[in-house]
Image (cartoon, helix red, strand yellow):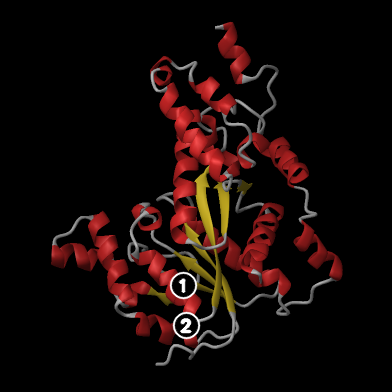
Amino acid sequence: MSENHMSSLAFGQAVIGPPGSGKTTYCFGMQEFMSRIGRKVAVVNLDPANEGTPYQCAVDISELITLADVMDNLKLGPNGGLIYCMEYLETNFDWLQEKLAKLKGHYFLFDCPGQVELCTHHGALKNVFAQLAKWNFRLAAVHLVDSHYCTDPGKFISVLCTSLSTMLHVELPHVNVLSKMDLIEQYGKLAFNLDYYTEVLDLSYLVDHLATDPFFKNYRRLNEKLVEVIEDYSLVSFVPLNVQDKESMRRVMQAVDKANGYSFGDLEQRSLEALMSAAVGADFHFTSTLAVQEKYVQPQEKTVEQEAMEI
């Protein structure tokens, strides 16, 4: 099959993120949401460890290879097995191309494996995305992370480092998403307003707050250097998401449509106002983030840092 077999443009999302961040749930919710607004959506499962997917699967990698078979036959662990599966997919691009060619005119959601190494330094998944680009797929990476990490400064810095590393390695237009917003304060309270985390504002305050912990006090210089790297690149920001909230899903969809160029196409009827909004960024994030905070974050009389100072 020739490289130019799929000559027309196809748009979609590469849904990535660590295990348990909600990738499969996101694909299911986004498939339903987009179908209701008239888009023809095809979900492609590229996770060989995915069993019993809740969404209607148009292409499933388990028809080619499964993690269980690799672990049994090659005596590999789950991490090594996933890497082998992705490398096996690399050598069988003709299978993937044949499956995708039957779905012309669809909008694609690629449900990817949750192994972090595949998105931060291993080349297999990146090569799959590069091959899709050669087939005229215009993809945006949707990187999901659990929102409750915002309540732990140390974990949030780790999330920022992982997100930045993923953005630089995957080399796709990128939308970072704080998933499960309805559970954001399940493990603790936010030290700052939600927009501080979504817009990744002055991180020196986070380092100061982290230094109030006796354990992290010894690692202040390390945290300062990590924060410097994040701020020097100035690439990471987040869109809050609750899959069960339609308005939240709409905001994420708009952000992804701008990232992969879908909002500038002619596949749907679009008003001049909508196009201008996408072009100049007139969708004010502060207002929308404030609305999300009022909905999911409990108001506090005192901030966490004020309580710490009193202690």
Quick one: label 1, few (<14), some, or many (20+) residues within 10 Å? many
Q: Position of residue 295 (x, y in %)?
A: 70, 39
Determine the CA span between mark 2 and mark 1: 9 Å
Screen quadrant of the C terminus: top right
Quick one: label 2, few (<14), some, or many (20+) residues within 10 Å? some
Front position in the image: 186 or 151? 151
Q: Residue at x 54, y 20 (%)?
A: 208
Q: Residue at x 74, y 45 (%)?
A: 288
Q: Position of residue 172 (x, y in %)?
A: 52, 63
Q: Could you say whether the residue bearing mark 1 is in a helix, strand or loop?
A: strand
Screen quadrant of the N terminus: bottom left
Check the image and report above or below for 270 versus 214: below
Say whether disc 2 or disc 1 marks the residue closer to the N-terminus. Answer: 1
Q: Which residue is mark 1?
A: 44
What type is the residue that disc 1 sits on? Val
Q: Residue at x 49, y 61 (%)?
A: 171
Quick check: can you spot residue 58? no
Q: Position of residue 273 (x, y in %)?
A: 85, 65
Q: Which residue is mark 2?
A: 100
Front position in the image: 107 or 211? 211
Quick check: can you spot residue 79? yes
What type is the residue that disc 2 sits on? Leu
Check the image and report above or below for 183 versus 268: above
Kindly indicate whether the residue at mark 1 contacts the one at mark 2 (C-beta within 8 angstroms): yes
Q: Residue at x 49, y 54 (%)?
A: 167
Q: Position of residue 213 (x, y in %)?
A: 45, 17
Say whether residue 199 is left or right of residue 75: right
Say whether residue 184 is left or right of residue 276: left
Quadrant of residue 94 within the rendered picture: bottom left
Q: Could you say whether the residue bearing mark 2 is in a helix, strand or loop?
A: helix
Say whether residue 279 is left or right of residue 306: right
Check the image and report above or below for 36 versus 233: below
